Amino acid sequence: MRIKEIQEKIDSYKDEGSYQPLKIEFKVRPPLYVGSPWIQFDGVIQYLCLRDVLGEIFYDLPTFHLFDFDKMQLPIKRTEDVYHASVGIYNRPALKTSKIYKRFEEYYLQFHPELKRRKYNISSGYYKNHMLTLPIIITDKVTFYTCANKKRLEELLPHLTHLGMKTSIGGGKIRKYKVTEESTDQSFYKDGYGATRPIPSHLISRQLIDEGAVFMNMAYKPPYWDKRNVTMCLAPKNQFEEAMGNIVEGEK
Protein backbone atom coordinates (compact mmCIF):
# COMPACT_ATOMS: atom_id res chain seq x y z
CA MET A 1 0.00 0.00 0.00
CA ARG A 2 1.31 3.45 -0.88
CA ILE A 3 2.24 6.00 1.79
CA LYS A 4 -0.59 8.31 0.70
CA GLU A 5 -3.20 5.57 1.22
CA ILE A 6 -1.80 4.70 4.65
CA GLN A 7 -1.92 8.37 5.66
CA GLU A 8 -5.53 8.59 4.50
CA LYS A 9 -6.42 5.60 6.67
CA ILE A 10 -4.76 7.24 9.67
CA ASP A 11 -6.56 10.56 9.02
CA SER A 12 -9.90 8.76 8.71
CA TYR A 13 -9.77 7.37 12.25
CA LYS A 14 -12.35 9.40 14.18
CA ASP A 15 -14.09 8.88 17.50
CA GLU A 16 -17.31 10.77 18.10
CA GLY A 17 -18.36 9.20 21.38
CA SER A 18 -19.01 11.03 24.64
CA TYR A 19 -16.12 11.42 27.08
CA GLN A 20 -16.09 10.90 30.84
CA PRO A 21 -13.39 10.91 33.55
CA LEU A 22 -11.97 7.41 34.05
CA LYS A 23 -9.34 5.58 36.04
CA ILE A 24 -7.70 2.52 34.47
CA GLU A 25 -5.78 0.18 36.77
CA PHE A 26 -3.54 -2.54 35.35
CA LYS A 27 -2.35 -5.39 37.53
CA VAL A 28 0.99 -6.40 36.03
CA ARG A 29 3.62 -9.05 36.50
CA PRO A 30 6.94 -7.29 37.12
CA PRO A 31 9.35 -6.22 35.90
CA LEU A 32 8.45 -3.37 33.52
CA TYR A 33 11.23 -2.51 31.08
CA VAL A 34 11.16 1.22 30.44
CA GLY A 35 13.17 3.66 28.36
CA SER A 36 12.08 6.69 30.39
CA PRO A 37 10.34 7.26 33.73
CA TRP A 38 6.93 7.49 32.07
CA ILE A 39 4.48 5.27 30.19
CA GLN A 40 1.95 7.51 28.40
CA PHE A 41 -1.64 6.31 28.14
CA ASP A 42 -2.43 8.18 24.92
CA GLY A 43 0.63 6.53 23.36
CA VAL A 44 -0.69 3.09 24.36
CA ILE A 45 -4.14 3.87 22.93
CA GLN A 46 -2.69 5.25 19.70
CA TYR A 47 -0.82 1.97 19.26
CA LEU A 48 -4.05 -0.01 19.69
CA CYS A 49 -6.00 2.29 17.35
CA LEU A 50 -3.34 2.07 14.63
CA ARG A 51 -3.43 -1.72 14.77
CA ASP A 52 -7.20 -1.50 14.50
CA VAL A 53 -7.36 0.83 11.50
CA LEU A 54 -4.36 -0.52 9.55
CA GLY A 55 -4.76 -4.25 10.17
CA GLU A 56 -1.88 -6.32 8.79
CA ILE A 57 -0.34 -3.19 7.22
CA PHE A 58 0.59 -2.07 10.75
CA TYR A 59 3.33 -4.72 10.84
CA ASP A 60 4.86 -3.68 7.51
CA LEU A 61 4.94 0.12 7.65
CA PRO A 62 7.64 2.04 5.74
CA THR A 63 10.68 2.37 7.98
CA PHE A 64 11.92 5.81 6.95
CA HIS A 65 8.67 7.77 6.65
CA LEU A 66 7.19 9.89 9.44
CA PHE A 67 3.40 9.85 9.28
CA ASP A 68 1.24 12.68 10.58
CA PHE A 69 -1.26 11.94 13.37
CA ASP A 70 -2.79 15.38 13.92
CA LYS A 71 -6.06 14.51 12.15
CA MET A 72 -6.38 11.16 13.89
CA GLN A 73 -8.88 11.42 16.79
CA LEU A 74 -8.31 8.81 19.49
CA PRO A 75 -11.25 7.91 21.76
CA ILE A 76 -9.86 10.41 24.29
CA LYS A 77 -10.88 14.01 24.88
CA ARG A 78 -8.45 16.51 23.40
CA THR A 79 -7.79 20.12 24.36
CA GLU A 80 -6.12 21.74 21.36
CA ASP A 81 -3.53 19.07 20.45
CA VAL A 82 -3.17 17.55 23.94
CA TYR A 83 -5.04 14.40 24.96
CA HIS A 84 -6.57 14.07 28.42
CA ALA A 85 -4.46 11.06 29.33
CA SER A 86 -2.00 10.70 32.19
CA VAL A 87 1.27 8.87 32.45
CA GLY A 88 1.27 5.61 34.40
CA ILE A 89 1.48 5.94 38.19
CA TYR A 90 3.40 2.98 39.63
CA ASN A 91 2.37 1.37 42.91
CA ARG A 92 5.28 1.36 45.40
CA PRO A 93 7.93 1.19 42.67
CA ALA A 94 11.44 -0.12 43.13
CA LEU A 95 14.18 0.43 40.57
CA LYS A 96 16.54 -2.20 39.21
CA THR A 97 18.85 -2.52 36.22
CA SER A 98 18.81 -5.43 33.82
CA LYS A 99 21.20 -6.50 31.06
CA ILE A 100 19.64 -7.64 27.79
CA TYR A 101 21.74 -9.59 25.27
CA LYS A 102 21.10 -9.66 21.54
CA ARG A 103 22.88 -12.36 19.55
CA PHE A 104 22.54 -13.55 15.98
CA GLU A 105 21.28 -17.13 16.30
CA GLU A 106 21.44 -19.76 13.55
CA TYR A 107 17.66 -20.00 13.25
CA TYR A 108 17.65 -16.36 12.02
CA LEU A 109 19.02 -17.70 8.73
CA GLN A 110 15.53 -18.81 7.72
CA PHE A 111 14.64 -15.09 7.63
CA HIS A 112 17.92 -14.09 5.96
CA PRO A 113 18.62 -16.89 3.42
CA GLU A 114 21.17 -14.72 1.60
CA LEU A 115 23.50 -15.10 4.61
CA LYS A 116 23.82 -18.85 4.05
CA ARG A 117 26.03 -18.10 1.05
CA ARG A 118 28.27 -15.40 2.55
CA LYS A 119 29.94 -14.23 5.73
CA TYR A 120 28.29 -11.75 8.05
CA ASN A 121 29.87 -9.57 10.71
CA ILE A 122 28.65 -9.97 14.31
CA SER A 123 31.14 -7.48 15.76
CA SER A 124 29.69 -4.42 14.00
CA GLY A 125 26.86 -3.34 11.72
CA TYR A 126 23.32 -4.67 11.35
CA TYR A 127 24.02 -8.18 12.72
CA LYS A 128 26.20 -7.04 15.61
CA ASN A 129 25.89 -8.84 18.93
CA HIS A 130 25.34 -6.35 21.70
CA MET A 131 24.36 -5.90 25.33
CA LEU A 132 21.92 -3.28 26.65
CA THR A 133 21.56 -2.13 30.23
CA LEU A 134 17.99 -1.01 30.86
CA PRO A 135 16.19 0.36 33.92
CA ILE A 136 13.31 -1.80 35.09
CA ILE A 137 10.49 -0.93 37.46
CA ILE A 138 9.36 -3.47 40.02
CA THR A 139 5.67 -2.85 40.70
CA ASP A 140 2.44 -4.82 40.73
CA LYS A 141 0.07 -2.08 39.53
CA VAL A 142 0.08 0.82 37.06
CA THR A 143 -2.75 3.40 37.19
CA PHE A 144 -3.76 5.82 34.45
CA TYR A 145 -6.26 8.69 34.50
CA THR A 146 -8.08 9.85 31.39
CA CYS A 147 -11.23 11.47 30.05
CA ALA A 148 -12.35 9.18 27.29
CA ASN A 149 -15.01 7.13 25.54
CA LYS A 150 -15.41 4.27 28.03
CA LYS A 151 -17.20 1.96 25.60
CA ARG A 152 -14.48 2.31 22.97
CA LEU A 153 -11.67 1.81 25.50
CA GLU A 154 -13.34 -1.38 26.71
CA GLU A 155 -13.26 -2.64 23.11
CA LEU A 156 -9.57 -1.81 22.67
CA LEU A 157 -8.00 -2.74 26.01
CA PRO A 158 -8.59 -6.53 25.79
CA HIS A 159 -6.05 -6.50 22.93
CA LEU A 160 -3.34 -5.04 25.18
CA THR A 161 -1.22 -7.80 26.72
CA HIS A 162 1.82 -5.95 28.14
CA LEU A 163 3.04 -2.51 29.22
CA GLY A 164 6.48 -1.05 28.58
CA MET A 165 9.35 -2.40 26.49
CA LYS A 166 10.79 -5.88 25.87
CA THR A 167 7.37 -7.50 25.98
CA SER A 168 8.68 -10.44 23.93
CA ILE A 169 10.59 -11.64 27.00
CA GLY A 170 7.64 -11.12 29.32
CA GLY A 171 8.19 -7.59 30.57
CA GLY A 172 5.10 -5.90 32.03
CA LYS A 173 2.64 -8.73 31.36
CA ILE A 174 -0.88 -7.60 32.21
CA ARG A 175 -2.69 -9.91 34.62
CA LYS A 176 -5.98 -8.01 34.59
CA TYR A 177 -7.31 -4.47 34.37
CA LYS A 178 -10.23 -2.43 35.68
CA VAL A 179 -11.91 0.68 34.26
CA THR A 180 -13.61 2.87 36.88
CA GLU A 181 -15.72 6.00 36.37
CA GLU A 182 -14.42 9.03 38.30
CA SER A 183 -16.13 12.22 39.42
CA THR A 184 -13.33 14.53 38.25
CA ASP A 185 -10.85 14.56 35.39
CA GLN A 186 -7.36 13.92 36.81
CA SER A 187 -5.62 13.35 33.50
CA PHE A 188 -3.68 16.66 33.78
CA TYR A 189 -3.42 17.18 37.53
CA LYS A 190 -4.17 15.16 40.67
CA ASP A 191 -4.46 16.76 44.11
CA GLY A 192 -1.62 15.67 46.34
CA TYR A 193 0.36 14.33 43.39
CA GLY A 194 0.81 17.19 40.95
CA ALA A 195 0.96 17.10 37.16
CA THR A 196 0.00 13.68 35.83
CA ARG A 197 1.11 14.21 32.24
CA PRO A 198 3.48 16.47 30.27
CA ILE A 199 1.68 19.81 29.93
CA PRO A 200 3.05 22.04 27.16
CA SER A 201 3.76 25.66 28.05
CA HIS A 202 0.81 27.01 26.04
CA LEU A 203 -1.64 25.12 28.28
CA ILE A 204 -0.02 25.70 31.68
CA SER A 205 -2.07 27.68 34.19
CA ARG A 206 -0.64 29.13 37.39
CA GLN A 207 -2.69 26.84 39.66
CA LEU A 208 -0.99 23.79 38.14
CA ILE A 209 2.47 24.88 39.25
CA ASP A 210 3.23 23.36 42.66
CA GLU A 211 6.34 23.97 44.72
CA GLY A 212 9.15 21.95 43.17
CA ALA A 213 7.51 21.85 39.72
CA VAL A 214 9.93 20.76 37.01
CA PHE A 215 10.01 22.15 33.47
CA MET A 216 11.86 20.44 30.65
CA ASN A 217 11.88 19.89 26.91
CA MET A 218 9.93 16.69 26.30
CA ALA A 219 7.35 15.18 23.96
CA TYR A 220 3.75 15.90 24.94
CA LYS A 221 1.74 13.89 22.40
CA PRO A 222 2.08 10.56 20.62
CA PRO A 223 4.15 9.20 19.07
CA TYR A 224 6.50 10.14 21.90
CA TRP A 225 9.66 9.12 20.05
CA ASP A 226 8.98 11.76 17.37
CA LYS A 227 11.20 14.80 18.02
CA ARG A 228 8.67 17.02 16.24
CA ASN A 229 6.45 16.64 19.32
CA VAL A 230 9.05 18.00 21.77
CA THR A 231 8.49 21.38 23.46
CA MET A 232 8.91 22.99 26.88
CA CYS A 233 6.54 21.24 29.31
CA LEU A 234 5.58 21.04 32.94
CA ALA A 235 6.81 17.50 33.60
CA PRO A 236 4.86 14.91 35.58
CA LYS A 237 6.34 13.43 38.73
CA ASN A 238 9.44 11.35 38.05
CA GLN A 239 8.85 8.09 39.94
CA PHE A 240 12.40 6.94 39.15
CA GLU A 241 13.44 9.32 41.93
CA GLU A 242 10.96 7.73 44.33
CA ALA A 243 12.13 4.25 43.33
CA MET A 244 15.82 5.16 43.75
CA GLY A 245 15.45 4.56 47.48
CA ASN A 246 15.00 0.87 46.71
CA ILE A 247 17.50 0.57 43.82
CA VAL A 248 19.02 -2.86 43.31
CA GLU A 249 21.72 -3.78 40.80
CA GLY A 250 21.06 -6.99 38.95
CA GLU A 251 21.11 -8.86 35.68
CA LYS A 252 18.61 -10.84 33.67
Image: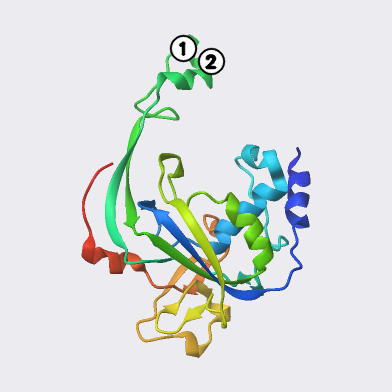
Residue matched to label 1? 118
The quarter in which the C terminus is drawn is top left
Residue 228, how many percent across, how many down?
Answer: 58, 60
Residue 163 vs 76, above or below: the answer is above
Residue 249, how many percent across, how many down?
Answer: 21, 51
Residue 142 vs 54, above or below: the answer is below
Kind of residue sitting beneath label 2: Glu
Q: Are marks 1 and 2 in contact (CB under 8 Å)?
A: yes
Q: Is the residue marked by circle 2 packed among few (<14), some (14-19), or many (20+) residues within 10 Å? A: few
Going 45% across and 30% down the picture, which residue do you hit? 126
Residue matched to label 2? 114
Kind of residue sitting beneath label 1: Arg
Q: Is residue 86 visible?
A: no
Residue 80 vs 152, above or below: the answer is below
Residue 235, how many percent across, how many down?
Answer: 44, 73
- How many angstroms separate mark 1 from mark 2 (CA)? 7 Å
User: Mark on residue 202?
Assistant: none
Going 49% across and 16% down the picture, which residue do you hit? 115
Residue 192 vs 35, above or below: the answer is below
Left or right: 214 in relation to 1: left
Residue 74 sits in quarter: bottom right
